[in-house]
């Protein structure tokens, strides 16, 4: 409602709904139509179109409608991004929790599974694979599309740069999608601050894949790989790249706990 008020100077949910419904699309076929259905054309053009197209490297009219459904639309003055009752990150950040999870476990860094696949497959009875599923199967059905990211970090001689952990930049004219000011995640008190600008870039094999592009073409290709994956007895596929789907962090943790529970249960049987 704060956004609707700033855009249209209206104050009630019904006023906002009336403006949005003027240009409703009953059966959205793509992200653009779905976004206009959810928030109206003005907010779509101002806040969604530029951000989304630089993020995915494709016109909104070519992206599937479900991508925008992650965006919570509320006709209230509640400003938090998520609706969850409890929100936060592990104390000390994700590095701390990963260190504790890996305590007393052998870790080998800078190893490429595909450089010596036969050797690594013999190390354990089961493999948890979180890499790209098309690479696992040597691209036998063709390459899936991904988006990559570029990060630029700098130290500012300021106590506070932007007043928030993350600020998004929705304009198409600005190359980066957001600036992260790390100290605000845990309210760290320092005289200087570190910020990171995040740029979406085209994925190439020399880069790291971050986001699957779940349009119709890629989804059909992924379905072929997924059929092969379902027949694997000794490999667990998990995460954004192996399952070729967008995961929020809480969903990743929930799914990991579920898979671990299933594995322990099956081992007990």
Image (spheres, rainbow, N blue to C red):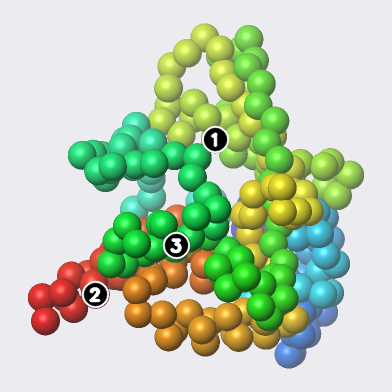
Q: Is residue 7 visible?
A: no
Which residue position holds label 3? 118
Q: Nearer the viewer, mark 3 or mark 2?
A: 3
C-alpha separation, residue under disc 1 versus residue under disc 3: 43 Å
For the N terminus, the image quarter is: bottom right
Which residue position holds label 2? 262
Measured as percent of width and height from the top left, residue 25 is found at 78, 85
> Height in image: 12 above or below 152?
below
Determine whether, in the image, residue 101 is placed left or right of residue 214. Answer: left
Label 1: which secondary element: loop
- For the residue pair 151 and 251, the one nearer the viewer reads as 151
**Disc 3 packing (10 Å; few <14; some 14–19; many ≥20):** few
**Disc 2 packing (10 Å; few <14; some 14–19; many ≥20):** few
Q: Nearer the viewer, mark 1 or mark 3?
A: 3
Residue farthest left in this picture: 268
Which residue position holds label 1? 165
**Residue at point 47%, 13% (across, down):** 190
**Residue at point 68%, 80% (across, down):** 141
Q: Nearer the viewer, mark 2 or mark 1?
A: 2
Measured as percent of width and height from the top left, residue 146 is found at 69, 62
Q: Quadrant of residue 189?
A: top left
Q: Which mark is residue 93?
A: none
The answer to whether the residue labelled 1 contacts the one labelled 3, judged by CB atoms less than 8 Å apart, is no
Mark toward the start of the polypeptide (3 vs 2): 3
């Amino acid at each position: 409602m704060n956004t609707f008020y700033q855009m249209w100077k209206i104050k009630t949910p019904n006023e906002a709904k009336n403006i949005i419904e003027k240009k409703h699309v009953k059966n959205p076929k793509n992200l653009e139509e779905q976004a206009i259905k959810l928030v109206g054309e003005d907010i779509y053009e101002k806040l969604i179109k530029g951000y989304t197209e630089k993020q995915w490297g494709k016109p909104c009219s070519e992206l599937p409608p479900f991508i925008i459904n992650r965006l919570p639309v509320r006709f209230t003055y509640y400003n938090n991004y998520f609706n969850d009752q409890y929100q936060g990150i592990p104390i000390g950040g994700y590095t701390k929790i990963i260190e504790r999870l890996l305590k007393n476990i052998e870790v080998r860094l800078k190893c490429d599974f595909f450089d010596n696949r036969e050797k690594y497959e013999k190390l354990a009875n089961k493999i948890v694979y979180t890499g790209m599923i098309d690479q696992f199967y040597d691209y036998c059905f063709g390459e899936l599309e991904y988006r990559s990211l570029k990060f630029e970090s700098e130290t500012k001689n300021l106590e506070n740069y932007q007043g928030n952990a993350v600020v998004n930049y929705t304009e198409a004219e600005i190359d980066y999608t957001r600036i992260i000011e790390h100290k605000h995640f845990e309210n760290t008190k320092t005289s200087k601050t570190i910020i990171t600008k995040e740029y979406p870039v085209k994925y190439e094999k020399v880069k790291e894949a971050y986001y699957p592009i779940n349009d119709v073409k890629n989804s059909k290709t992924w379905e072929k790989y997924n059929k092969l994956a379902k027949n694997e007895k000794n490999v667990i596929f998990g995460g954004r790249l192996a399952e070729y789907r967008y995961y929020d962090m809480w969903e990743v943790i929930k799914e990991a706990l579920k898979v671990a529970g299933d594995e322990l249960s099956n081992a007990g049987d």
